[in-house]
Image (tube, helix red, strand yellow):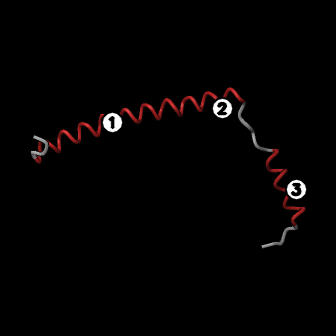
Amino acid sequence: MAKTSPFEYIQQVRSEAAKVTWPTRKETLVTTAMVFVMVVVASIFFLFSDMIIRWVVGLVLGVGR
């Protein structure tokens, strides 16, 4: 592997960072909102899944009567 000087490394990093397409503020806000909505949906799904599984296990094992 070839050795790279610290100065050359920094130049390469800046060059690659300049190629990045950064999201706009609106895109960032929309995707953040989508993440929060999906977290709420997943939380509700797992809440109901847990309740159903607990109920089924209670029926099978006769626990909680």
Choose top left, top right, bottom left or bottom right for residue 1.
Answer: bottom right
Residue type highlighted by circle 2:
Thr
For label 2, the SS is helix
Q: Position of residue 58 (x, y in %)?
A: 15, 43
Quote the CA–CA distance across marks 2 and 1: 29 Å
Residue indicated by mark 1: 47
* Label 3 crowd (10 A; few <14 / some 14-19 / many >=20): few
- Residue 56: image x %, image y %? 17, 41
Answer above or below: position of 31 versus 50.
above
Label 1: element kind: helix
Q: Residue at x 54, y 30 (%)?
A: 34
Q: Position of residue 37 (x, y in %)?
A: 49, 29
Q: Earlier in the sequence, mark 3 or mark 2?
A: 3
| Residue at left offset 84%, top offset 50% | 15
Label 1 neighbourhood size at 10 Å, few (<14), some (14-19), many (20+)? few
| View extreme (right): residue | 7
Q: Nearer the viewer, residue 22 or 54?
A: 54
Q: Residue 7 lies in what quarter of the image?
A: bottom right
The disc, 2 or 1, on the residue closer to the chain's N-terminal end is 2
Residue that appears at 52% across and 32% down: 36
Q: For marks 3 and 2, give the CA distance.
A: 28 Å
Dot 3 lies on which element?
A: helix
Q: Is residue 30 above or below residue 4?
A: above
- Give the quadrant of residue 52: top left
> Marks 3 and 1: CB-CB under 8 Å?
no
Q: Amino acid at mark 3?
A: Gln
- The residue carrying mark 2 is 28
Please tell me whether mark 3 or mark 1 is closer to you in this view: 1
Using the numbered discs, state the Cα–Cα distance from disc 3 to disc 1 in whole angstroms: 51 Å
The residue labelled by disc 3 is 11
